[in-house]
C-alpha cells in the first residue's frame, strides 16, 4: 500500500485550514484516512477565540483516532464522538451556538481485508477506483444544489441566501459543534475486493472538475495517480491566476487551500 498526502495553502504565508492524515495499524491490515476543509469565517464572526486550523486539527485528530481504534463503531458514530470531544475542548471559552463557530467539511474512509467504509459531509469528495479502473465519486451535493435557486431567488446576494441555510433543514451541513450533524453525512460501504484505490480531495482541488472543467472525476483521479497531486494543484493555480477576478469562472475565493490523500496498492 502506498499513501500520499499533499496540501497547499491558497495563499502562501497564510494559514492552511485543511487537515489531512492517515493511520495504518502496526502489525495489522487496513487503515483509515481523514480529510477536513476548515470553513473560513469573516474576521470577528466566529464566536470563538480559536482559529479554524486549531479546530480542524482537533476534529481531524480525534476523528482519525476514533476511526482507527474503534473499528466496531460506524464512521457516523466516530464523527459524532469527534465533534463532541472537540466541542468540549472549547465549550467553556467560546460561543458554540454562533452560526460561524469553527466548522469543517469531512471525508473519511476506513478499510480492512473485508470492506471499505466511507463518509462524506459537504463539498469535499472521495473517489473510489474499482479493480476495472472505473472511478466512482462519492459526493454530498446539497451545497451545489442550492446555488441555482440562490441566483434566482436572491440575485443581489446569493451568498447570503446560501449562508442562511448552513446547518439548517433544507440546506447543507458541516461539522461544527452539534454531533447530530454526523447523521446528515453521505455514507456507504463496499467489499474490499471491489476497491483498488482511494483518493480524497478538498474543494480547493475539486475546482479542477467543478469550477474550471479541466476534466471529470475519473480524469482527475488519473492525474493524481499518474503525475501526483502537486501537478493537479499546479493546474488549478494556473487556472486561478488566469482568471483572478472570477469573471470567467465564478467562485467564492480567488484561491483556496487544496489538499489530497491518495491510497494506492
Image (cartoon, rainbow, N blue to C red):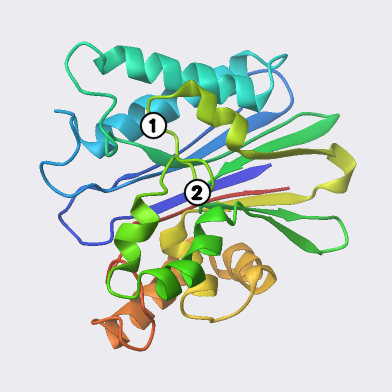
Query: Where's the N terminus, which quadrant?
Result: top right
Which residue lies at the image location 60% right of the left edge and 51% below the top edge? 140
**Quadrant assignment, res 90:** top left
Q: Position of residue 45 (x, y in %)?
A: 16, 41
Asked if 125 appears above or below 175 in the picture, the reply is below
Q: Residues within 10 Å of mark 2 (few under 14, many from 20)?
A: some
Above or below residue 217? Residue 244 is below
Tag shown at residue 192: none
- The residue identified by callout 2 is 171
Secondary structure, mark 1, is loop
The residue shown at (23%, 47%) is 41
Say which quarter of the image contains residue 127.
Answer: bottom right
- Left or right for 69, reference 122: right
Give the distance between the C-alpha atoms of the residues marked 2 and 1, in whole angstroms. 15 Å
Q: Residue furthest front?
A: 153
Where is residue 129 drawn, in percent x and y?
76, 56
Would residue 196 be found to the left or right of residue 208 on screen? right
What secondary structure is marked by label 2? loop
Residue 69 location in percent, x, y?
A: 60, 14
Q: Nearer the viewer, residue 2 or 35?
A: 35
**Quarter residue 182 falls in:** top right
Amino acid at each position: 500500500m502506498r499513501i500520499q498526502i499533499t496540501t497547499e495553502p491558497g495563499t502562501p504565508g497564510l494559514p492552511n485550514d485543511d487537515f489531512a492524515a492517515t493511520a495504518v495499524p502496526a502489525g495489522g491490515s487496513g487503515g483509515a484516512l481523514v480529510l477536513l476543509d476548515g470553513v473560513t469565517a469573516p474576521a470577528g464572526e466566529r464566536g470563538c477565540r480559536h482559529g479554524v486550523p486549531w479546530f480542524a486539527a482537533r476534529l481531524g485528530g480525534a476523528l482519525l483516532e476514533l476511526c482507527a481504534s474503534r473499528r466496531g463503531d460506524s464512521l457516523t458514530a466516530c464523527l459524532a464522538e469527534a465533534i463532541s470531544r472537540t466541542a468540549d475542548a472549547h465549550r467553556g471559552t467560546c460561543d458554540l451556538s454562533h452560526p460561524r463557530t469553527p466548522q469543517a467539511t469531512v471525508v473519511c474512509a476506513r478499510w480492512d481485508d473485508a470492506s471499505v467504509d466511507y463518509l462524506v459531509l459537504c463539498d469535499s469528495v472521495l473517489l473510489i477506483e474499482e479493480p476495472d479502473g472505473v472511478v466512482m465519486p462519492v459526493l454530498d451535493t446539497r451545497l451545489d444544489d442550492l446555488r441555482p435557486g440562490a441566483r434566482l431567488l436572491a440575485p443581489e446576494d446569493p451568498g447570503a441566501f446560501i449562508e442562511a441555510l448552513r446547518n439548517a433543514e433544507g440546506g447543507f451541513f458541516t461539522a461544527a459543534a452539534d454531533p447530530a450533524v454526523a447523521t446528515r453525512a453521505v455514507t456507504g460501504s463496499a467489499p474490499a475486493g471491489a476497491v483498488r484505490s482511494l483518493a480524497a480531495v478538498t474543494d480547493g482541488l475539486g475546482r479542477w472538475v467543478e469550477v474550471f472543467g479541466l476534466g471529470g472525476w475519473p480524469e482527475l483521479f488519473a492525474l493524481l495517480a499518474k503525475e501526483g497531486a502537486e501537478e493537479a494543484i499546479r493546474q488549478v493555480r494556473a487556472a486561478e491566476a488566469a482568471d483572478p477576478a472570477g469573471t470567467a469562472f465564478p467562485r467564492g475565493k480567488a484561491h483556496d487551500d487544496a489538499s489530497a490523500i491518495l491510497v494506492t496498492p
